Image (tube, rainbow, N blue to C red):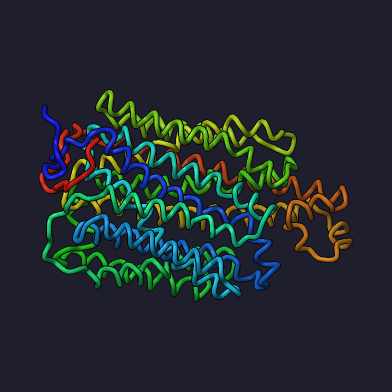
């Protein structure tokens, strides 16, 4: 076949491996930023609280980012269907970098919270658009070969975030947790600008701003209710019930609105597709299970086994290794055998086994005994979102690729929030009852402040031997309970995935994505 010229660009499905890999570099950088920023502040929070004060508002650094990124995820996906991926991707990167610079320059806690929220607006696009862009240039039959790398990069960044953040805090200032985004983001923007040059077909409909408003009105109170119920107001308080009621009413109005909107952000017609319904339900449940799988491992390592924060970050690396290797391997196997259904079933089976394995840990367990179940957990988690996104993309028209991709990410984010609320509530309740049972009234009377019983690992290790033993036993029992709860959650997700149908993967991208002047490779 004669070589093409720049005036004669390749057609859909004819992109070379080199061309796709160049785009993949930019998408990997964007995914890395999004994953890193979701967790990098965990180890820097004490330093931020010491500098700014306002420790009671530290949670908003995470809540603000989670809220805005969750809301932005479906909106950016739909806008990219209407106006093109490159413009929306560049806007997402720009918002993320503006938020990063503002956060690095923040002079008080309020400024930092607002800056993190701006970051989240960009982060929503960085989480959903890479897979939509891959869907523009690679057919479903070959997409797993490349998409596995995107999932692996995101997992790598999210798992290593606390370790990188701890290193930055130990050797520099917490401000560098945000400055590090600039070179990565600028490089990603440059590659996006020069490599993502195909044309999206023009669409005449305006953005569904009514749907965007209803998503905001429904998601915000629901997430706040779930986050605050366990730590501030309680599940039966008027505040919690009022927020839940407002969120549910707005969610119903959102569904009714999306059924009539010309270009809905989350098209309700998707739910007429059985594969999409199955994936949506499974991803929501998996999102909660993933949160429970990762939340308490550092706490177990630091409080129960006594390792340092830095070493606990290193000991979590096996989970990252399992996640990244499984994601890449699963993508290649899907391309080779053209079957995706067995992958999430095996993955959820491994996650269930890992949760069961983690329930065997107790106060006598050493740090190294945690590594094997963590690795198995990573193997199970790695390919699930890859398959969920690929299967959903495979059953909709190409014109809806941004909407369907971002909606899957949206369901996972909501599941993460429900999982956070549920697992945290279970852990807190079990820990409180355990501390009351394991520490005598006489021992409590010797303490200047009962809050030290739930203090930092360093504070707990400094307690009198009798008290320290009771605290460690209480933490171990509370964490054990969360892993017991994780087993039926994984089994529920597995039950949904058993209903997932296998549909042959399309071997064409679609007739609507028109590449324009991609570099020859």
Q: Is 321 placed above or below 7 here? A: above
Q: Residue at x 63, y 70 (%)?
A: 56
Q: Hey, which quadrant is residue 12 in on the image? A: top left
189 and 499: which is toward the camera: 189
Q: In this view, does 60 lie above or below 199?
A: below
Position above or below: 373 against 243: above
Q: Quadrant of the C terminus?
A: top left
Left or right? Give the position of 66 relative to 214.
right
| Relative to 187, 113 lies left or right | right
User: Whole-percent x and y of residue 199?
Assistant: 16, 52
Q: In which quarter of the image is residue 176?
A: bottom right
Could you say where residue 303 lies in the image, as x and y percent from the top left? Answer: 72, 47
Inspect this view and state whether residue 382 appears.
Answer: yes
Q: Residue 364: x and y, percent?
A: 74, 34
The residue at the far top in this view is: 337
Q: The N terminus lies in which quarter of the figure? A: top left
Which residue is at 31% across, 46% downward?
Answer: 131
Q: Nearer the viewer, residue 448 or 459?
A: 459
Count of numbered marks: 0
Q: Is residue 246 toward the left or the right of residue 510 in the image?
A: right
Foreground residue, 485 or 38? 38
Identify the residue shown where x is 34% and y is 42%: 24
State whether residue 397 appears in this view: no
Residue 75: name its quadrant. bottom left
Residue 33 position in % (x across, y down): 46, 52
């Amino acid at each position: 076949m004669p070589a093409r010229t720049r005036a004669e660009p390749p057609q859909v499905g004819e992109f070379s491996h080199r061309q796709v890999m160049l785009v993949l570099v930019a998408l990997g950088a964007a995914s890395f930023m999004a994953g890193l920023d979701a967790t990098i502040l965990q180890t820097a929070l004490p330093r931020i609280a010491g500098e700014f004060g306002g420790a009671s508002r530290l949670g908003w650094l995470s809540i603000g980012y989670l809220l805005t990124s969750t809301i932005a995820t479906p909106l950016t996906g739909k806008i990219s269907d209407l106006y093109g991926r490159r413009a929306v991707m560049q806007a997402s990167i720009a918002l993320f970098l503006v938020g990063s610079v503002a956060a690095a320059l923040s002079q008080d806690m309020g400024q930092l919270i607002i800056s993190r929220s701006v970051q989240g607006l960009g982060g929503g696009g960085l989480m959903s658009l890479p897979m939509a862009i891959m869907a523009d240039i690679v057919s479903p039959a070959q997409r797993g070969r490349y998409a596995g790398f995107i999932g692996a990069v995101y997992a790598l960044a999210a798992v290593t975030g606390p370790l990188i953040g701890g290193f930055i805090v130990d050797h520099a200032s917490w401000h560098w947790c945000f400055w590090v985004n600039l070179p990565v983001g600028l490089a990603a923007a440059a590659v996006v600008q020069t490599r993502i040059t195909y044309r999206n077909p023009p669409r005449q409909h305006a953005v569904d701003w009514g749907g965007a408003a209803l998503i905001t009105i429904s998601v915000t109170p629901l997430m706040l209710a779930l986050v605050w119920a366990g730590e501030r107001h309680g599940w039966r308080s008027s505040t919690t019930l009022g927020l839940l009621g407002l969120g549910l009413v707005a969610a119903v109005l959102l569904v009714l609105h999306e059924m009539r909107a010309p270009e809905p952000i989350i098209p309700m017609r998707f739910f007429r597709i059985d594969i999409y319904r199955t994936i949506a339900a499974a991803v929501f449940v998996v999102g909660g299970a993933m949160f429970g799988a990762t939340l308490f491992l550092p706490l177990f390592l630091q409080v129960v086994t006594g390792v340092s924060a830095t070493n606990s970050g290193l000991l979590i690396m096996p989970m990252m290794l399992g996640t990244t290797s499984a994601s890449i391997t699963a993508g290649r196997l899907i391309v080779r055998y053209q079957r995706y259904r067995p992958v999430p079933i095996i993955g959820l089976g491994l996650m269930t086994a890992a949760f069961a394995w983690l329930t065997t840990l107790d106060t006598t367990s050493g740090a190294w005994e945690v590594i094997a179940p963590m690795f198995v957990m990573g193997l199970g988690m790695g390919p699930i979102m890859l398959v969920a996104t690929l299967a959903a993309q495979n059953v909709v028209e190409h014109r809806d690729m941004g909407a369907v991709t971002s909606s899957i990410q949206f369901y996972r984010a909501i599941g993460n929030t429900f999982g956070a609320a549920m697992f945290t509530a279970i852990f807190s309740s079990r820990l409180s009852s355990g501390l009351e049972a394991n520490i005598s009234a006489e021992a409590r009377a010797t303490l200047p402040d009962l809050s030290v019983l739930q203090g930092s690992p360093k504070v707990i290790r400094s307690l009198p031997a009798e008290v320290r033993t009771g605290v460690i036993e209480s933490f171990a029992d509370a964490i054990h309970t969360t892993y017991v709860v994780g087993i039926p959650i994984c089994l529920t997700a597995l039950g949904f995935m058993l209903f997932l149908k296998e549909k042959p993967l399309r071997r064409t991208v679609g007739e609507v994505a028109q590449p324009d002047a991609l570099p020859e490779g």
